[in-house]
Image (tube, grey):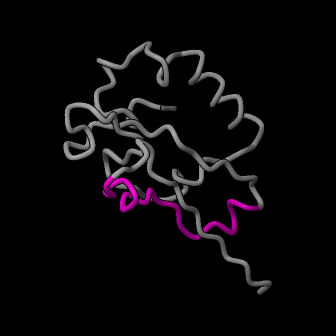
């Protein structure tokens, strides 16, 4: 999770895998190359996550992390018109603990 706002409980997760300083620094290095986090190109609801543990009804209680990302070049960022986490598959009978992140792009030449 690149930032505290990407973690349901930043204090409890501080320093743990998925939220550690080295992982966050590596993510920032990718952004430093000019890549953009498509999800953060748009206003998002607070507590928007892409992963929830199977235990303790974490999905139902929205106790998650945002650890799935779509990174785009500046040119592609300019054509990105939406990005969201699709929670519908996570509600299926035997889902993954991750929900897909979807980005939509303008593909017209005009």
Query: Which residue is the extreme one toward the front?
Result: 94
53 vs 30, left or right, is left
Q: For residue 36: magenta?
A: no
Residue 45: x and y in percent read: 33, 54
In this view, 97 is above or below 44? above
x 72%, y 34%: residue: 32
Q: Nearer the viewer, residue 58 or 35?
A: 58
Q: For residue 81: magenta?
A: yes
Which quadrant of the figure has residue 14?
A: top left
Query: Which residue is the extreme one toward the bottom?
Result: 110
Magenta region, residue range: 76-93
Q: How many numbered discs, if any?
A: 0
Residue 98: x and y in percent read: 45, 44
Residue 85: x and y in percent read: 44, 56
In this view, 56 is above or below 37? above
x 52%, y 53%: residue: 39
x 44%, y 40%: residue: 66
x 53%, y 43%: residue: 68
């Amino acid at each position: 999770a690149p930032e505290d706002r990407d973690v349901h409980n930043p204090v409890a997760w501080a320093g743990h895998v998925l939220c550690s300083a080295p992982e966050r620094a590596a993510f920032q290095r990718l952004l430093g190359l000019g890549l953009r986090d498509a999800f953060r190109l748009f206003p998002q609801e607070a507590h928007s996550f892409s992963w929830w543990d199977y235990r303790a009804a974490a999905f139902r209680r929205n106790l998650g992390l945002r650890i799935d990302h779509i990174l785009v070049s500046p040119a592609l960022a300019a054509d990105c018109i939406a990005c969201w986490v699709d929670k519908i598959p996570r509600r299926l009978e035997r889902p993954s603990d991750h929900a897909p992140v979807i980005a939509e792009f303008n593909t017209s030449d005009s």
